[in-house]
C-alpha cells in the first residue's frame, strides 16, 4: 500500500508541480493528478488517437484558449453546436461578459431588457444573432453546397474571420481535425440554417453521414484515448463509436453530474467496460469537478 | 407570509394527497408539489401547447409507462435517440434488467462477459443489436424514403410491433404527436442507419428540416408549457424554439445537475427569462430530484 | 436476473402501492422502495434496536410530523441542536414560514430588516430568541441541576408546552427515548445556556457522559438498525457507537451529499463495513434524494 | 460590464498566476479566483479576526500541510474531532494510505479483514486505536484536570509528539490559537475519554464553557472574516458566534453540498445576511468544489 504523501505548498510554485503533488493527496485532488498523468500518456503514445468531447458553455466562460490548446493533440473533436456558435460569435468580433452577483441572484428580467442572454454568471449580447444572420447570408453561396455537418463546419472555419490561435472552427479547418457535431440543429448555427431555409434557400445536409468517419477512425486506430468535458451528446457520440472497436485504452472524464439518476453525462467511465467501450485494463479516471477549475490543472500538469 | 403547514402522513394515504400536503413543506417537497400544481394548470389551459423534453435512460429504468401517460397531454415530444432505441428494443420483445449491487460496486468486466450493457443499476442485453439490425433490414424498403427525422421516427412507430399502450414510438405515430430527436445519429437507431449505409443502401435525412415544425408550433401557440426531464439536447432544442415566441408561460424542470458549472442541463428555468424563452411572470419551478422519484409524484399529484 | 417491471400509475393510487411499484424501477426510485422494505424489516425485527440520526432543518421545513412518526419505533434518537431548538420554538407557539422565490433568488437584506432568519426557502422570526430566553430564565431552577445533555433535553421535554403528538422533546421525554445531541453547544439552546452562564448562573453539563449510554445500547443490542437523514454529527455519533458492536444489520441513509470529497455525511453506508460499523451481509441502501421527498415515501411504504 | 478575458496557459506557469487568470473566466474558476482575492484582503486587514471552520477528512487525505499553512493567519480554529484525532494519530507515528480503485469500487470486506478503516479513497489502520489508548492512559494525569474542550485540546497539543510544522494540535497550542471542537465526543479522542471514564477515571469537561470565548472574540473584533471548508458543526458554531456581532465582512465557503435540501453545510453564505451573520455589503464567495482541489489554489493565489 502506498502512503499518503500530503501536499505542501511553496511560494512561487509552478502549476505542474502542484498537480504532481496532488497525486499524493486523496479525494478529488488525486483524480486531478491522475488525469494529468493519463493525459501525458495519451499524448506521448504514438498509437493513440485522442477523441475529445466537449459540452457546456466553455467558450462564453473564457475557456476557448484552453480548448485551443487541447486541439494541439486532439485527433477527433466532438462538441455541441453552442460551443461552435459562441466561437463564431467571438470570431465575428463579439465578447462575452461577467454578470456578477452575490451567490446566484441574477436579475434575469433586467438582463432581458438589456438584451443579455445569461449562462450562469456569464452573458452574451442578444445582438449577436443579427450579425450571425449577416454572416450566413453573405456566405451562403459557398456554404450551401455542403453535404455533411463536418463539411459545413470546416467550411465556416475556412471563411470566418480569426486565426487558428483564437478560433476553434478555424483551427479545426486548418489543422484538418475531424469536427463532429451531431446536434448542430440544436444551436445558433442551426437556427441560421433554418433561417436560410425559411428565406427560401436550399441546403441538404445529411444527418447521419458523419457517422462513417468517426466510426472508421475509431475502428482503425491502434489505441483510443477519450477526454470528456461535461458529457452530453459529444460524450455519447464518441462512446458509440468505440463500441465497434476494442474500446478505449485511456480515459478522462470531467463532470459534476451524478451517476445515480442514470444519465449518460454522469455515468462513470467504468460503466463503459460492460459495453466494451472501455478496455477492462484501461487507464482512466473520473474527475468530479467544475471543468473551468479542473481542465487547466490537468492540462498544465501534462505540459 | 404563509405559515409552513407541515406534513402528516395517514395510513392508506393517496399519492395525490401526499403531493398536495408536500405543498405545506419547505425544501424539495415543496418544489414537487408546486410542479404538480403547475402541471395541472398546463393540462387544463386550452391555449397551452405542452413541450415535453426527456433525456436519460428512463425506458431501461422502467419509466416507459409514466412517459406514455405524459404523452396523453403532450403536444410536442423531444427526446434522445437512446429513449427511442430502448423503446423499440422493448417493442421487439427484449427486457431490461436490474443489476443489484451494494452501493455502486458493479463488476463491469463480468457484465461484459455476460453480454450486458450497464446503465447505472440497469442493464440491456447486448444481443438487442442483432435484432435491431434484422428489423431495419427487413423494413428498409419503407423506411428509406423518409426525408426528416420526425418522418423516419413516425414510420418506425407505424411499422414496429406493440401498441400505443406500451410503445412510445407507436403512440407518437398513432396520436400524431410531433416527435423530434435532433441527435438521432447519436443512438442505436442512428447506428442502424449507418449500418444500412455501410451496406450500400441510400437514405437522405435532412439534419435541419424538423426545425421548421417545432419553431412553427412554438411561434403559433397562444401559450407554451415546458417540461424537462434530465436536460440535454431535448431541453435545449425546445428552449431554442421558444426564443421565437414570447416565451413559455409554464415550466417544470427535473434534474440533479448543478447550475454553477454552466451547462444547459443544470441551468435554472429562470435563466430563460434573460433569453426571452420564459415569460418573466411565468409559473415555473425547478425540481432538484431524481426523475424516477419526482416524476411519478408530480404526475399523480396532477391527476 | 430480475426483469425491470416498470412503473404504471393508477388514479387514486395509494402511496404504499406507489413505493412498492418503485421497486420495479431502476435508479433512485428503486432505492426509495428498497429503503421502505428495509424499514419494514427493522421495525418488525424484535431483536433490533433502531438508531435514528437526523441533521438538517427538518422542523422548520414542516417535517416534524414525520419525525414524530419515526419516533414511534426509534430506540435511540440523535439529532442536531437546531432540530431541538426549532422544536422548542414551535412548542412555545412560534411558526415557521415560506419564503417563496423564483429559483433561489432570496432578498436576504430585506429578510434581515423584517427580522426573518432564512433556511433556504423557509424562515424563522428572529423574535424567537427573546421568548427562548424567557423560557430558560423562568425554568432555570429546574434545568440547572442537569448533569448530562440527555438529562437536560429530557428535562426540557418534561416542562415545555406541547404534547407527545406535536413536540419531539416532549415525546422523547414521555416515551423515554434516549435523546443525544453531542453538539448542543452549537444551537439556539446552547446559546441560552451560554446566556444563563453570562448572567452569572452556574451549570455543569459533562460533554462526554452521554457516550456511555449510547455505546452501551449499541453494545448490548442483539441487532442494530440505522437510519440517517442528512449526515453530520448525528450520523457520525451513531456510527461511532457501532464500532464497539458487531456492526449494524440494517441501514438506510438519505442524503444528497457526494462521497468523493470525503466527508462523513456523503460517505456511503458500505464504507462502514471496512470499519466494522456495518455487517458485511447487512441489508442497507443509500438514498440519494432530498429527505423532504424521500422520507415520507419510505415511511408510508413501510406502513 | 466587464468582458470575459479568458484563460491562456503558459508553460511553467505559477499557481498564483493561474489563479489570477481564473478571475477572467466564468463559472467555478471565477469563484476560486475571487476566494483568493478575498483571502488576501482578510489576511492584510489588521482589524480582521479570521475564523476558520473545517470539517471532512482533510488530514487523512493529506491536506494537513495546507491546514497548517492556513493556521499562520487563523485567529480562531474550529474543526471536527476527527480532524484532531487524525492529526494526533499522525503525530503518534501512523500514516494514512491510498486505496486505489476504479471509480468507487472498494472492497470493504477485504479492507475490514486487513484492519483498514476507509474514508472514500483513503484508509487508516485500525490499529491506531490501541496506540491512542496508550497515549491517553500514559498522559491521563495531566489531561484529567482540564475543564473545557479547548483546554483539553491545547493540553494534548502541549504533550503530544511532533512540532508546529507538522501537527495541528501542537501548532494551535504553541501559537495560542483558540481551538474549538464542540462535538469532540463524536470522535476518536472522545472515545478515549469515554474509555478512561469506563476504566473508572474521572474528568469533568463542560460542554458549554468554550462558547464564551468564541462569542467574546467575535463580539470584540473590529471585523470578522470566515473561511468554511466542508460545513458541519465547525461552520455552524462560527456562524452562531457571529450572530452577536455585526456579522462578517469577509467570507469564503468551499463545499459541494447543495443548498436546496436545507442543511447548514450547503447553505450559501448569502443566507447569513438574513440572520445578521454576514454584513449585507460583505465581500464573500461560495466555491462549489472539492476542497482538496480548491483550497490549495485559493491559498497559493493569496500568497
Image: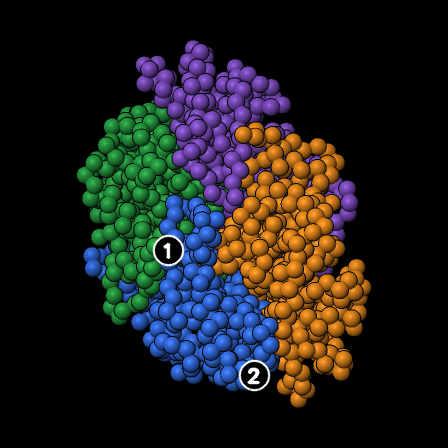
Chain colours: A purple, B green, C blue, D orange
Decide which of D161, C250 is in the foreground and name it. D161
Decide which of A245, B226 is in the foreground and name it. B226
Q: Which residue is mark 1?
A: C98
Please identify the quadrant where the N terminus of chain C is shown.
bottom left
Decide which of A53, C174 is in the foreground and name it. C174
Q: Which mark is residue A22?
A: none
Q: Which residue is mark 2?
A: C147
Residue A256: tell me if it is visible: yes
Please identify the quadrant where the C terminus of chain C is shown.
bottom left
* Whether residue A144 is situated above or below residue C251 in the rendered picture: above
Numbered disc 1: secondary structure: strand
Q: Residue at x 78, y 71 (%)?
A: D158
Q: Earlier in the sequence, mark 2 or mark 1?
A: 1
Q: Residue at x 64, y 45 (%)?
A: D38
D230 left or right of D147 in image: left
Count of numbered badges drawn on the protein: 2
* Whether residue C249 is situated above or below residue B48 in the rendered picture: below
Amino acid at each position: 500500500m502506498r502512503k499518503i504523501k500530503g501536499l505542501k505548498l511553496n511560494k512561487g510554485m509552478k502549476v505542474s508541480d502542484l498537480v504532481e503533488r496532488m497525486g499524493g493527496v486523496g479525494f478529488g485532488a488525486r483524480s486531478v493528478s491522475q488525469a494529468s498523468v493519463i493525459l501525458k500518456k495519451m499524448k506521448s503514445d504514438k498509437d493513440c488517437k485522442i477523441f475529445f468531447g466537449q459540452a457546456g458553455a466553455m467558450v462564453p466562460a473564457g475557456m476557448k484558449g484552453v480548448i485551443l490548446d487541447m486541439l494541439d493533440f486532439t485527433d477527433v473533436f466532438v462538441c455541441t453546436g453552442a460551443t461552435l456558435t459562441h466561437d463564431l460569435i467571438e470570431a465575428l468580433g463579439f465578447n462575452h461578459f461577467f454578470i456578477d452577483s452575490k451567490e446566484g441572484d441574477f436579475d434575469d428580467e433586467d438582463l432581458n431588457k438589456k438584451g443579455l442572454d445569461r449562462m450562469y454568471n456569464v452573458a452574451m449580447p442578444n445582438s449577436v444573432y443579427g450579425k450571425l444572420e449577416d454572416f450566413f447570408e453573405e456566405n451562403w453561396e459557398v456554404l450551401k453546397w455542403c453535404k455533411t455537418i463536418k463539411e459545413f463546419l470546416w467550411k465556416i472555419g475556412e471563411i470566418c474571420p480569426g486565426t487558428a490561435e483564437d478560433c476553434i472552427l478555424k483551427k479545426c479547418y486548418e489543422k484538418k481535425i475531424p469536427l463532429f457535431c451531431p446536434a448542430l440543429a440544436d444551436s445558433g448555427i442551426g437556427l441560421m440554417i433554418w433561417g436560410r431555409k425559411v428565406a427560401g434557400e436550399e441546403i441538404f445536409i445529411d444527418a447521419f453521414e458523419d457517422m462513417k468517419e468517426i466510426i472508421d477512425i475509431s475502428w482503425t486506430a491502434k489505441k483510443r484515448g477519450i477526454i470528456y468535458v461535461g458529457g452530453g451528446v459529444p460524450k455519447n457520440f464518441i462512446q458509440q463509436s468505440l463500441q465497434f472497436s476494442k474500446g478505449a485504452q485511456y480515459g478522462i472524464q470531467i463532470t459534476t453530474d451524478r451517476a445515480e439518476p442514470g444519465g449518460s453525462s454522469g455515468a462513470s467511465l467504468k460503466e463503459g467496460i460492460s459495453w466494451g467501450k472501455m478496455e477492462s485494463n484501461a487507464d482512466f479516471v473520473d474527475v468530479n469537478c467544475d471543468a473551468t477549475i479542473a481542465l487547466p490543472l490537468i492540462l498544465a500538469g501534462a505540459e
